[in-house]
Image (tube, rainbow, N blue to C red):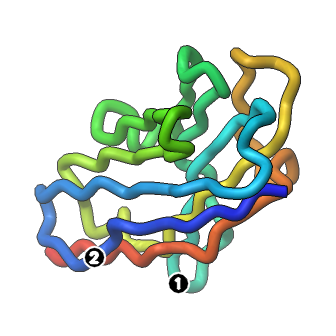
Amino acid sequence: QVRLVESGGGLVQAGDSLRLSCQASGRTSSTYAMGWFRRAPGKEREFVAAISWNGLSTYYVDSVKGRFAVSRDNAKNTMYLQMNSLKPEDTAMYYCAATYTSLSSKYYTAGNDYYYWGQGTQVTVSS
């Protein structure tokens, strides 16, 4: 199994940037796709970004396209989410997720596709 730990959240002002990290440990020798989700207070969990095992395929929710960038360093077993031009509506708990796959270029956007989840890191953007 894979254990995921997020870090990098915090309180920032609108327009600022943050970089979230997701450190994977455990059975990381197998190929796994990863993704970022978020949950704002009183709202459903929302897909944010996904990345394939080889890092060549990525996908974003429309609301973050052009502002967020997902990447990964498999040598460090770490996925990143660079968040620029943050808005108050980006305020949420951010979770990383992982799922084993035999398809190195495939990403997943549905929460039900992911088997492993981190505990989350809070991002708060003030106006």
Residue at 74%, 21% in the rendered image: 106
Circle 1: is it few (<14), some (14-19), or many (20+) Cα within 10 Å?
A: few
Position of residue 127 in the picture relative to residue 51 (left or right): left
Residue at 55%, 73% in the rendered image: 120
What x and y, as percent, mark residue 61?
Answer: 53, 40
Nearest the camera: 16 or 115? Answer: 115
Q: Is residue 60 above or below residue 112?
A: above
Q: Is residue 67 above or below residue 88?
A: above
Pointer 2 residue:
10
Q: Counting residues from the N terminus, which is met first, the one under dot 1 or under dot 2?
A: 2
What x and y, as percent, mark residue 35?
Answer: 62, 45
**In the image, what residue type sits under mark 2?**
Gly
What x and y, as percent, mark residue 30?
Answer: 80, 34
**In the image, what residue type sits under mark 1?**
Pro
Residue at 55%, 25% in the rendered image: 58
- In front of the other: label 1 or label 2? 2
Circle 2: is it few (<14), some (14-19), or many (20+) Cα within 10 Å?
A: some
Number of residue marks: 2
Nearest the camera: 21 or 60? Answer: 21
Q: Mark 1 and 2 residues: CB-CB less than 8 Å, in contact?
A: no
Q: Quadrant of residue 91?
A: bottom left
Q: Secondary structure at mark 1?
A: loop
Q: Secondary structure at mark 2?
A: strand
What quarter of the picture does the N terminus occupy? bottom right
Pointer 1 residue:
41
